[in-house]
Amino acid sequence: MNFSQQIPKILIFGLLLSGIGVVVNNMMSGSSNAAIVDVKMPAKLSAKAVNGKRTFSKNCESCHGENGSGSEQGPPLIHDIYNPGHHGDESFYRAAVSGVTSHHWNYGNMPAQPQVSQYDMENIINFIREVQSQNGIRYKAHGM
């Protein structure tokens, strides 16, 4: 058998091997809600941040991931894009009240969260800012 007669067998073998690779990769990748960033938690949170973490877990974590690490449903909040100079505290309040049109990420628009009060948001923001600080995210003046 010459090489040209072997080509179909080689192609079929290659496709089969590729398919097995895809299946194994999907099996090994684990949760479809994997964190986007690796978040380091502070050793201790303030009382407001502890309350904020609890409220965040109930209302925000399903999209923004555990401790704001992001997921396939929403962006990480422990990311330099959300530093206080680019997204001040008021932007978090507005997001909860009015929702947000997608502008930095390709997750789609964020719906308003009317069940989250202004008091809850104050605590959530404290939580996010303390975790951001632990991860080296500081105020940087926005350059637009």
Image (cartoon, rainbow, N blue to C red):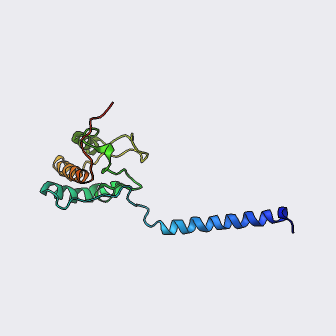
For the residue pair 143 and 97, the one nearer the viewer reads as 143
Farthest residue in the top direction?
144
For the residue pair 89 and 108, the one nearer the viewer reads as 89
Residue for point 59% across, 66% down? 21
Give x and y (percent) for residue 69: 33, 56
For the residue pair 27 and 114, the one nearer the viewer reads as 27
Q: Quadrant of residue 99?
A: top left
| Left or right placement of residue 66 versus residue 129 in this view | right
| Left or right placement of residue 95 versus residue 29 in this view | left
Give x and y (percent) for residue 100: 33, 41
| Left or right placement of residue 87 versus residue 45 in this view | right
Quadrant of the snapshot with the N terminus: bottom right
| Position of 127 relative to 24 (above/below) | above
Farthest residue in the left direction?
47
Residue for point 42% across, 55% down? 72
Q: Quadrant of residue 50?
A: bottom left
Count up the numbered dots: 0
| Position of 24 relative to 136 (above/below) | below
Residue for point 84% across, 61% down? 4
Give x and y (percent) for residue 134: 23, 54
Quadrant of the snapshot with the C terminus: top left
